[in-house]
Amino acid sequence: MKLVEQLVAGSQTEELIWLNGYIAGLLAGKNSPEQQQLPAVQAKPSINKITIAFGTETGNSKKLASTFAAKAKKAGINAKLVDLNQYRLNDIQKEEYFITIVSTHGDGEPPAAAKKFFDHIHTNGFKLEKMNFGVLALGDSSYPLFCKAGEEIDLQLRKMGAQRLVPLQKCDTDYDTDAESWFEGVLQRLSATSPNPAPSVETIAPKKSAGKKIYTGTILTSINLNDQGSNKETYHIEIEAEDVDYLPGDSLGIIPENPQHKVEAIINLLEIDAEKKYTFRNEEYTVFDLLKKKLEIIYLPERVVNAYASLVNQDIPATRIGLLDLLKIYPLKNSDQVEQLVGILEPITPRLYSISSFTVNDELKFGLCSNYLSQFEVGKQVQFYIHKNLQFRLPADDKDVIMIGPGTGIAPFRSFIAHRDSTGAPGKNWLFFGDQHFITDFLYQTEMQSWIDTGSLSKIDLAFSRDQEEKVYVQHKMKKNGKQLYEWLENGASVYVCGAKEPMSIDVENTLIKIVQEHGNKKLEEAIGFVHHLRNEGRYLKDVY
């Protein structure tokens, strides 16, 4: 003890800070239960300023970033919190301590809000040699390219000369514990006098996920909403299930099975026993179960086709193709290659559908789904999970909402209107809906008429594109009602868009900017800024696909 007192007395302030951080690191690295129970040494951070940037689609990254910023400030660090959608790209070369939290969507893509940042660091060729960074990657291990966006940001920042402050952390859907532990590591590194170099560990894998909560429901109703003569089939499916935790704006997640005739055709072509077992992701399955329930065989992505080309030593054009056709055109050399084939195939990915449901007398009613469900008979059971979407929530009851949802984009807005109807919310509701033909494609026409009659739906504008010579879409109806739409925005209304990402959501946004420009008497740059401000305030929200 006397030695410690002498050491402290003879040390400068900077040396004491380093020593404090060093001891904290030693304690954190011990594994015995006794040592783990010791209180953590709280070192005063030697770094007083960091940037915490988030890219989010469903709100999880934003929630974590806000939590981390609060923790940093409590630890004495000035944390700048910023959405990557609003991040000034030229600032990146000035950053010294940069924490990024980003989710992965689609086929390994970053969220739409992070796309500009993602493209900027991949295409501009500048150096970031003064940057120390950390990346927290959120994802869903049900998908093949788990946490791919976070991985690519981490890799690119290193290529540009930035130094890792902490290893890349991958997080599955139950991310709270991993994320909190990772950020504690960030704070600990910032408490050291010289944070570099980072630990040698490349990536921290997520703890084994407890998995999503899977519900089992029974199909009560399956109805094609389109009338005879329509070019489409849009199914309304009601599923009864108990204790389902969801809110309007959330999605229903289903992992479909492959068509049996395709599975049987592949097994016959390969000339193998359907009951023969192979290992996939550390578990054993029969060939039949693998092809029916686990492996994607209908549309193989190019990366799988490329891997197959290497397996059979063939020059196969880059394309998306089904496994059955691929095996017919470029057959395996022998049955021994089946095991290798299993190794390069990817799991069936979940399909997400906007829930158009609401609660009536404690009975849960679920809405639109897919061709997979459309073939199910009434009474059949189906398993599903709920995908939370924190970025697509109704505002306060007294706030007005403008909903733009052509085609199947109507789904979440059906739940929005029904929810507000059941709660008696005083806010006004304005719906823009469109499809091909009024007679055959006016989805939920009777319900919409009823809500208009009762006042639950304050205003509805319809656009049926093929009912006249010149096509009319929802954006045309927006423009026609531009003055009133802008007045609603000025009075605090929120705008929601659901449906096709391209071109619908892009056309809608461009029209919204033009409306603000014209009826707000603004320059183009000011109108764009106005719409960006709506987004920052949480008043311009999109659920597009």
Image: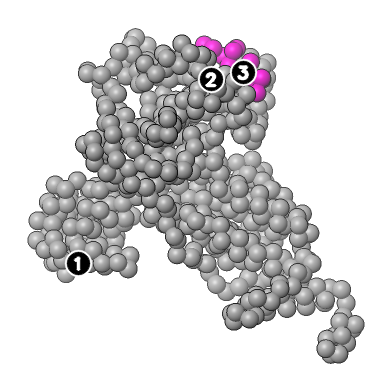
Which one is closest to the eye, mark 3 or mark 2?
Answer: 2
Q: Where residue 438 sits in the image (x, y, percent)?
A: 33, 13
- Measured in 3D between alpha carbons, the distance from the residue under mark 2 to the one under mark 1, in whole angstroms, is 55 Å
Q: Residue at x 63, y 44 (%)?
A: 83
- Quadrant, the N terminus: bottom right
Q: Where residue 380 sits in the image (x, y, percent)?
A: 24, 41
Can you tell which mark lies on residue 153? none
Tell me which amino acid carries mark 3. Answer: Trp
Q: Nearer the viewer, residue 344 or 23?
A: 23
Residue linked to disc 1: 277
Residue linked to disc 3: 488
Residue 236 painted magenta: no
Q: Nearer the viewer, residue 121 or 247?
A: 247
Q: How many marks?
A: 3
Q: Residue at x 51, y 54 (%)?
A: 138
Q: Residues within 10 Å of mark 3 (few under 14, many from 20)?
A: some
State the SS at label 2: strand
Of the image marks 3 and 1, the number of the one nearer the N terminus: 1
Tell me which amino acid carries mark 1. Answer: Lys
Residue linked to disc 2: 429
Q: Residues within 10 Å of mark 2 (few under 14, many from 20)?
A: many
Region of the chain picked out in magenta, as a range: 475-492
502 sits to left or right of 373: right
- Measured in 3D between alpha carbons, the distance from the residue under mark 3 to the one under mark 2, in whole angstroms, is 10 Å
Q: Nearer the viewer, residue 449 or 327?
A: 449
Do callouts 3 and 2 mark residues in contact (Cβ within 8 Å)? no
- Quadrant, the C terminus: top left
Q: Residue at x 76, y 57 (%)?
A: 74
Of the image marks 2 and 1, the number of the one nearer the N terminus: 1
Residue 503 in sight: no
State the SS at label 1: strand
* Residue 382 higher or lower than 190, as above or below: above
